[in-house]
Structure formats: structure tokens, C-alpha cells
């Protein structure tokens, strides 16, 4: 953070992580108030991964995410209002209320969901990258998935296909150490996920997923590698989920001490602390950021509240395309 | 068609290949991907020679990763390509069922209309080659259960030749089921055979006494049965469904309104099946046109056996169709 540009960027990263954090805290509250239903998977604790990675993508790049994707959607630039309206089930939502929390989509920013089948998005990302390669487009498809996905066949099939065909996919494993409530030591014979890239001849690395600047540096290296036509890249981001898996999780599988220990590495406080130490950021500026973010979240809630229900007469729309030509 | 149209002798296999070739020439976004489609020439030799003509980018051999390459087909379709994904056989397609059902069929809806999937998946289906219980089932009726996809099953050469291009023009996923016993079937096609509609069932033989509702390889069993029955003075009308989802109810209901009898012949299993669905629709929409209950001839509810005599006994047969029609016409 030597130059004013870097300082400005760091504060912007902090603001994005704060937005995700406050947006999700509000979402949890609205879930308890029954405004939001279905499954709600919070990203709190893992914000550095999405924010760090998105900073390295161009507007043309594609993103494939999972059911825990509020953070990716916000960091990619989807409006908080359209996400909140989606979770309310309103037709002003990013998926018209057809998807909910797990299925956020936005064609304008090449955000391909919101896939709630664990590892289901990986083959899709391979196909998007294949289409790019065949059409001579130089773009990266960033594919997020959790450590749980690594146990699925689709992970291995997709890794092999991407490496075999040298496709521009950035595989981003958000290793939060638990596949829902089962620790990685109970699910992986070899829990070193980054090492699995070698089996496919794929460039790979791991990074501290609690450090947004480290994530950004690692992702920048990975995307540069991919953009130079070197094929896919696996980046394991080692992170931690502070909240339960979903709103129905009583967290019998981990200790409060463990969660507290990880909270000491909170990605937001880490970056804020660094900025403060460098004399670039003070309590007043922090308060200013919080105020801005709170206003954005409040506006999102107001937008969702004011949203409208899609008429039931439209129930059977979007099963088949209304325009019949491909 | 005019008798002046130049005709050529061909096979079902060649007709499918010609359809793929034409699509590849007409639209550079089209490519074929699947197990053994390139260097091997296709498990059923459908794509033999296409690798030399179009190269490995567009005739793309895949590893044995059904879920992976079907999912990649979905992604490529989202990315602006028009993939034809070949799955070797319907039983193997179950390894990709997650991608077909949870992604291909749902993306348009989950995204509120933003992302359609213009993907074509072809696969071999059906019994008759002693391939036993993991290569020979007819699960297209299962796929026809799924909203968001279209299911077609060409029986005649003109459909084998013409359905693919129309399917590629569809903005949504289309699954094409090719019965493996048909690939060697010979016949003639106009030299300039082209696209056909994939919306309507067709009457393949008109008749006044009973409506036989069928598709794919069973069509020929029904036509053979109708030929025999005609000699006894029973005129069976034979309907080729062609498209299994969405079903063209109007065509078979109009036929039943004339014949007042309906027999469904389906190589799928009976319980919870396409034949059950059609029967229910006739009850709902054509009940008062019927002189007697709808009947069905389906495959025996067993995993397909290997031994030839048992496989034959398990499948719908010309004799069983004839016997059912005789009974229905004489007693109804």
C-alpha cells in the first residue's frame, strides 16, 4: 500500500467486504423475521476470497458460483437491491424470485449462478471456457466451489477436461474445512487440495483465504497465467465460515473455541488493522464506511420490501424460451 | 413429394451422419463431442469419417466422463456454441442425469429467463442386440417426465435426417433418442432431404378400426402388425409420436375419435411410464370417444436379459400386437 492508488484500492476492498458482511447480517435477521425463506448460506468469514478474486477479473470474464454466493455476486457488482429482492422472492430480484438465495444470476455481468448441486458448476465452467477458446475470446471463467465439491466426481472430471483441453478456467476452491458439518479430515484421504492439481498436470497454489491482499495477489498471478494461454489453474483459498452452514445448523461438529480462534483472523479486521497501522485509516473513516454500507443495505431492504410478486398467471413461464429460435 | 425428386438409398446411420455433417457446414458454432466420436468413428459408427473432415476441435473425443462432458456441453451452449453431445447409450446417460435435470432443464427457470441452453444431446436407446441389463433399456419416457427439455425419437430415415437441424434451432435443450436397432435400417431419401418439424406426431398408416400409438423401433413392429391385420380386414391406424415431450395430444386424440380404440406400444417399462401418461391423457381428453379401455403393450418389467429368446420375450412383438388388436376389435 505504497501509492495512493494502492491505498484507495485497499479501502475499496475493505468496503466490499464490509458490504458483504453487513448485507448478510441483515439477511440473517430477515430470515429470522421470515422475510427470507428456503436455505440461506452465509459467507461471513470468507469475504476475502470473493473480493480478492473479483478484483482480478475483467468485465468480460465469466463467474460460476455455488449456493453460498452472496459474496461473489456482490463483489462481482450485482446490486444488493436485486439480490435482496431475489431472497424476498420478488419479481424485481435478479432471478425474478425464481431462484432465491441459492440461485443468483445476472447475464449483464456474466454471472452464471448460483449452482446448488455441489460441484455441479465445474463442468459448466469448463464448457464456458471451451466456448471461449473455440470462438477465440480471451476471457477467464472463474469457478468457485467448496472443499466438499472436491469429493464429487464432477470435480475430477472437470479438472481433467480443463487440463486436457487447456481451457481458461480458474478453479477456486474455498476450503472452509467443512463439507456442511463434516470436517475435511473425515472426507478427504489427502486433504491438501492444491496438491490435487498436479494429478491433472494443472498449475496450482494455495493461499491464506483470510487475507484479501494475499488472495488478490495469488488470483492475479493465476489469471495472468490463464490469460497468457497456459491453460487452467487451481487456487485453493484456505478460509473459514464463521456462521453455521445454513440457518438450520446447530454446529455440533466444531467447538466455539475453534470458531473464536478463526475470528481472530477476521479478513475485515485484518485489513482494517493494516490500514490503521499504516496511518491510512482511522476510526472516523471506518465509521464513514460503515454508514455508507448500512445505507446501501437499508436501500436494498427497502427495494425488496417495495418489490412486487410475480403474478401466479406467469407460473409456467421460463420453462421453455419464449423466443423459439436459438 | 414429387416423383421427380432424385432419391438415394441410405441407412439410418448415414442419415444421422449426413444431418451432423450438414449442421457442421451450415453453422460454425456446431460441434460434436462425446466418447469415441472421433478417432474410433462413433460407437455405432455414426461419426465415422467426420474427424478427417472437420478436425479434432469440432469432432471432439471426450474421456469417459458423462457428467463432465454433458455439463461442458451445457456450458458451451451458454457460451454461444451449438454443441451436439453424443452419449454412448441411454444407460450411461444416467451418469449425466444430474447435469441434464439439475442444470440443462432448470437454468432458464432458475435464472428468471436469462440463460437458455441451446444444447442437443443424442444417445442410443433400446434393446434387441443382446446387450443385457446395462446397455439396453428404453429410458426416454423417464426423460419425457422433465419440464424444460424436449424429447424426440426419430423412427423413419427422414426424421433421422431432419430432426437434428430443427433441434439445433431450438433455444432449449433437445434430447434425441436413436434406437440402436435402427442404425442399419436401409431405405431411400430424397437427395436434398432437409429439416423436419419436431412438434407433431404423424399418421404413418391410416386405418379406421383402431389407433396404434407408438414411436421409434416399435413403429415398425406396429406397421408389420397392421400389414398382417389388413389381410384379415382390420385396418389399424399407426401413429408415430416422434416427439415425446411435449406430446402432440391432438393427433392421437383425433385418430381415436375416428377409430374409438387405442393401443399404446412402448418399449419402455409399463409402470409410471410414457404409455401410462398417454393412457391418462386419453382418459382425460378422449374418454367418450372410446368403445373399450385403452390397452398397452410394453417391455416386461425386468432388467433386460441377455439370452436372445428371453430378450425377445421381454419386448413388444408383432405377434403380441396382432393378438391384442384382434381381441380389442372383435370384442369392442
Image (tube, helix red, strand yellow):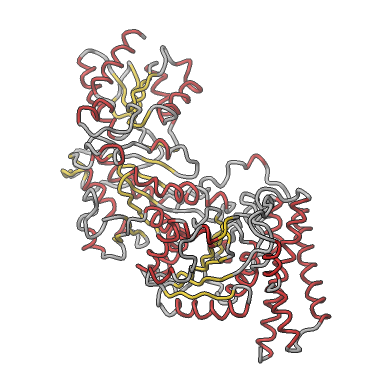
Q: Nearer the viewer, residue B306 or A102?
A: B306
Which picture quadrant has residue B84?
A: bottom left
Left or right, B115 with respect to A24, comes to left
Picture quadrant of residue B292: top left
Where does the image place residue A239, in percent across and percent down from the top left?
Answer: 60, 69
Name the residue located 30 percent from the left edge and 61 percent from the top edge.
B60
Q: Does residue A188 lie above or below B311 as drawn?
A: below
Q: Can you give x and y, in whole percent of width and height, for residue A257 in the image?
A: 70, 65
In the orientation shown, which residue stands out farthest toward the top? B331
The percent coordinates of residue A49 (x first, y second) are: 60, 71
Extreme residue in the left direction = B9
Q: How many marks?
A: 0
Q: Does A314 appear above or below B66?
A: above
- Percent x, y for residue B72? 41, 59
Question: Which residue is nearer to you in this view: A224 or B284?
Answer: A224
- On the rendered image, what quadrant is the C terminus of chain B found in? top left
Give the side of residue B75 with respect to residue A12, left or right: left
In the rendered view, tell whether residue B331 sits above or below residue A210.
above
For image coordinates 48% across by 80% down, the residue present is: A224
User: Which quarter of the rendering shows the N terminus of chain B?
Assistant: top left
Amino acid at each position: 500500500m505504497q501509492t495512493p492508488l494502492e491505498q484507495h484500492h485497499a479501502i475499496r476492498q475493505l468496503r466490499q467486504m464490509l458490504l458483504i458482511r453487513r448485507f448478510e447480517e441483515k439477511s440473517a435477521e430477515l430470515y429470522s423475521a421470515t422475510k427470507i425463506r428456503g436455505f440461506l448460506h452465509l459467507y461471513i468469514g470468507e469475504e476475502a476470497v470473493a473480493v480478492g478474486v473479483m478484483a482480478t477479473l475483467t468485465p468480460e470474464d465469466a463467474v460460476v458460483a455455488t449456493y453460498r454466493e452472496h459474496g461473489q455476486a456482490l463483489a462481482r457488482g450485482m446490486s444488493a437491491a436485486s439480490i435482496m429482492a431475489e431472497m424476498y422472492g420478488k419479481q424485481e430480484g435478479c432471478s425474478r424470485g425464481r431462484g432465491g438465495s441459492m440461485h443468483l444470476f445476472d447475464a449483464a455481468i456474466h454471472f452464471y449462478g448460483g449452482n446448488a448441486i455441489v460441484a455441479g458448476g465445474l463442468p459448466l465452467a469448463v464448457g464456458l471456457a471451451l466456448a471461449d477458446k473455440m470462438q477465440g475470446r480471451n476471457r477467464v471463467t472463474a469457478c468457485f466451489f467448496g472443499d466438499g465439491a472436491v469429493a464429487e466426481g464432477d470435480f475430477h472430471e472437470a479438472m481433467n477436461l480443463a487440463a486436457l483441453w487447456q481451457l481458461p478456467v480458474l478453479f477456486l476452491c474455498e476450503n472452509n474445512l467443512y463439507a456442511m458439518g463434516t470436517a475435511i479430515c473425515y472426507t478427504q484421504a489427502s486433504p491438501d487440495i492444491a496438491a490435487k492439481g498436479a494429478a491433472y498436470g494443472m498449475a496450482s497454489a494455495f493461499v491464506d483465504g483470510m487475507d484479501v491482499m494475499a488472495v488478490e495477489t495469488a488470483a492475479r498471478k493465476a489469471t495472468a497465467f490463464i490469460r497468457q494461454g497456459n491453460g487452467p489453474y487451481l487456487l485453493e483459498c484456505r478460509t473459514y465460515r464463521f456462521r453455521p452452514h445454513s440457518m438450520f445448523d446447530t454446529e455440533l461438529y466444531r467447538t466455539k473455541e475453534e470458531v473464536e480462534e478463526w475470528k481472530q483472523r477476521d479478513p475485515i479486521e485484518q485489513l482494517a488493522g493494516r490500514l490503521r497501522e499504516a496511518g491510512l485509516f482511522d476510526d472516523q473513516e471506518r465509521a464513514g464506511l460503515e454508514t455508507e454500507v448500512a445505507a446501501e443495505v437499508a436501500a436494498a431492504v427497502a427495494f425488496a420490501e417495495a418489490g412486487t410478486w410475480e403474478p401466479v398467471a406467469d407460473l409456467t413461464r421460463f420453462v421453455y424460451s419464449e423466443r423459439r429460435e436459438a | 413429394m414429387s416423383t421427380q425428386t432424385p432419391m438415394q438409398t441410405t441407412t439410418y446411420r448415414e442419415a444421422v451422419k449426413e444431418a451432423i455433417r450438414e449442421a457442421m457446414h451450415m453453422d460454425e458454432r456446431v460441434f460434436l463431442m462425446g466418447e469415441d466420436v472421433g478417432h474410433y468413428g462413433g460407437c455405432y459408427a455414426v461419426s465415422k469419417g467426420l474427424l478427417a473432415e472437420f478436425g479434432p476441435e469440432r469432432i471432439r473425443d471426450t474421456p469417459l466422463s458423462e457428467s463432465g462432458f454433458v455439463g461442458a456441453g451445457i456450458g458451451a451452449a451458454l457460451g454461444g456454441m451449438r454443441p451436439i453431445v453424443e452419449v454412448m447409450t441411454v444407460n450411461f446417460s444416467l451418469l449425466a442425469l444430474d447435469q441434464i435435470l439439475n442444470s440443462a432443464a432448470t437454468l432458464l427457470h432458475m435464472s428468471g429467463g436469462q440463460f437458455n441452453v441451446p444444447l442437443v444431446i443424442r444417445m442410443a436407446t433400446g434393446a434387441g442386440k443382446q446387450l443385457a441389463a446395462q446397455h439396453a433399456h428404453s429410458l426416454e419416457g423417464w426423460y419425457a417426465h422433465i419440464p424444460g427439455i424436449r424429447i424426440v425419437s426419430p423412427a423413419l430415415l427422414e426424421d433421422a435426417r431432419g430432426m437434428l437441424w430443427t433441434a439445433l434451432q431450438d433455444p432449449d435443450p433437445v434430447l434425441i433418442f436413436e434406437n440402436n436397432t435402427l442404425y442399419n435400417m436401409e431405405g431411400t431419401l430424397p437427395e436434398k432431404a432437409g429439416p423436419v418439424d419436431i412438434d407433431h406426431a404423424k399418421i404413418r398408416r391410416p386405418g379406421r378400426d383402431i389407433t396404434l400409438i407408438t414411436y421409434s423401433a416399435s413403429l415398425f413392429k406396429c406397421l408389420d402388425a397392421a400389414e398382417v391385420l389388413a389381410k384379415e380386414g382390420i385396418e389399424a391406424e399407426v401413429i408415430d409420436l416422434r416427439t415425446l415431450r411435449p406430446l402432440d395430444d391432438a393427433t392421437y386424440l383425433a385418430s381415436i375419435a375416428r377409430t374409438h380404440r387405442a393401443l399404446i406400444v412402448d418399449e419402455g417399462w409399463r409402470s409410471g411410464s410414457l404409455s401410462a401418461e398417454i393412457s391418462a391423457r386419453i382418459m382425460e381428453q378422449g374418454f367418450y370417444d372410446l368403445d373399450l379401455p385403452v390397452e398397452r403393450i410394453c417391455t416386461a418389467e425386468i432388467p433386460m436379459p441377455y439370452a436372445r429368446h428371453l430378450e425377445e420375450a421381454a419386448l413388444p412383438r408383432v405377434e403380441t400386437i396382432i393378438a391384442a388388436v384382434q381381441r380389442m376389435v372383435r370384442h369392442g
